[in-house]
Every structure is written in C-alpha cells, then in structure tokens.
Image (tube, rainbow, N blue to C red):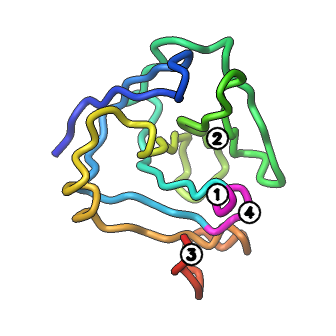
Amino acid sequence: MLRTYTGGCQCGAVRFEADLDIGAGTGKCNCTICWKMRLWTARVRPEAFRLVSGVRDLTDYQGSNTVAHHLFCRHCGMHPFERVDTPNMTGGPYLNINVACLDNLDIDELMAAPVTCYDGLHDDWGARPSEVRHL
C-alpha cells in the first residue's frame, strides 16, 4: 500500500518525505559501498521524494559508478538516501531510500515484502548475485 513516510539521518539535520509501497518490494546490492554499509533500500522516482531539510548538510560521494550519488549527513555520517541518474538500469532517475532511516516503518510489512538482490559488484544489475546470504 502506498504511504507517505518520513525519515532522516541519526542527528536529525537531514529530513525527507517519500511516497513508498514497502509491500511492493525492496532491494539489496552487492557492490562494495552497499555491502560495506549493509544498505537495504526502497526505490522511488524523484516526484515521490521531498527533501524537507538538510540540503546543506549532505555530502555527495561518487564511487566508480558515476550515476550513483551516495549522500551522507556531514554531521552524523548516516546515509538516508541516494540519487541515481541516467543512464542506469531503469532508464530514468530514481532515489534509493535507506529503509533503516524511515520513521515508524512497519517491520511486519518490511519482512513480508519481496527483496530483489542486484549484482552491482559485477555491473550486471539485472542479475541476481550468486551469493546473497551476506546482504
């Protein structure tokens, strides 16, 4: 069910709203940054995301995948969301919302939702990694 969630970083400097359907599914990636962060995400299009506060508190890190903007709070280091530009696997820009940064997330709904694993490590985004137990 589509619902407007609020969320943010640990210290509260960065706050956002996102219209998400957690039950439709979430994702995990095996690329080095996602694996090291243990990032678990829900994808939204830009029109379903609103940054409420903290634009100046965000630091943008780009690794080898230059379309991915890994945004961190410069105060507490949390990674509440990332922006992905085109070209990418969906053909349009989107944001990955860190589900751990959502307020009042229904854990039962999260655990019941399907999880798609992406092979970002090998830049084969349409494939499921051969090993996913650690994600």
Q: Are the residues tagged 1 and 4 within 8 Å (C-beta)? A: yes
- Residue labelled with disc 2: 85
Q: Residue at x 77, y 53 (%)?
A: 65
Q: Are the residues tagged 3 and 1 within 8 Å (C-beta)? A: no
Query: Is residue 134 rendered to the left or right of residue 113?
Result: right
- Residue labelled with disc 1: 34
- Which one is closest to the eye, mark 4 or mark 3? 3
* Badge 1 element: helix
Image coordinates for residue 41, horizontal then vertical, percent: 47, 51
- Specify which label sits upstream in the sequence, 4 or 2: 4
- Residue labelled with disc 3: 134
For the residue pair 12 and 68, the one nearer the viewer reads as: 12
Q: Which residues are magenta?
A: 30-36
Image coordinates for residue 69, horizontal then vertical, percent: 69, 39
Label 2 neighbour load within 10 Å: few <14, some 14-19, many 20+: some
Check the image and name the residue furthest to the bottom: 130
The answer for how far apart the CA atoms under marks 1 and 2 are is: 17 Å
* Badge 3 element: loop
- Specify which label sits upstream in the sequence, 4 or 3: 4
Q: Amino acid at mark 1?
A: Cys
Q: Amino acid at mark 3?
A: His
- Which one is closest to the eye, mark 4 or mark 2? 4
Q: Amino acid at mark 4?
A: Thr
- What numbered label is drawn on residue 32? 4
- Relative to 2, say whether 120 is above or below: below
For the residue pair 95 and 34, the one nearer the viewer reads as: 34
- Specify which label sits upstream in the sequence, 3 or 2: 2
Q: Residue at x 52, y 40 (%)?
A: 95
Q: Amino acid at mark 2?
A: Asp
The answer for how far apart the CA atoms under marks 3 and 2 are is: 27 Å
